[in-house]
Amino acid sequence: MKISKEFIVKRLLPIIIGMIGGYAYYYFIGCNSGNCAIQSNPLYSTLYGGLIGLIIAIPTKKKEKIKSENNEGN
């Protein structure tokens, strides 16, 4: 499978940015007491940030459907 540049930009880049953001959140804001499950562990905060990036990267069909309906009405 050849990975295209479009796939990287639209799918992988938001996940990587989310993971970096999750780790930065742990590093700069994190919880030192250990009571905060996500904030006190760098692995969990990084994975949580990646999950947020994945949610952003999931494509939706709704926008394409609205565009096609508008073009048919013209």
Image (cartoon, helix red, strand yellow):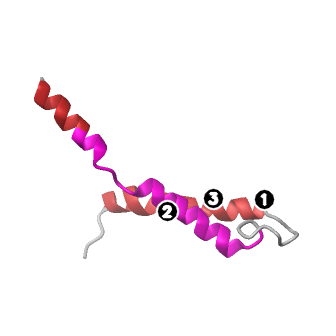
Percent from the top left, x then y, of residue 74? 12, 23
Residue under pointer 3: 21
* Res 3 label: none
Residue at point 34% right, 54% down? 59
Task: Residue 29: name its quadrant.
Answer: bottom right
The CA distance from mark 1 to mark 3 is 10 Å
Q: Residue at 30% across / 69% down in the picture?
A: 3
Residue 52 coordinates in the image, percent (x, y): 54, 59
Give the residue number, with chain letter if any, for mark 2. Answer: 15
Q: Quadrant of residue 31?
A: bottom right
What SS does tag 2 mark? helix
> Magenta stretch?
40-65
Does the magenta portion include 18? no
Q: Is residue 20 left or right of residue 72?
A: right
Is 58 left, or right, of 73 in this rendering? right
Identify residue type, mark 3.
Gly
**Residue 15 against residue 2 in the figure, above or below:** above
Please report whichever mark, 1 or 3, sits nearer to the chain's N-terminal start: 3
Amino acid at dot 1: Phe
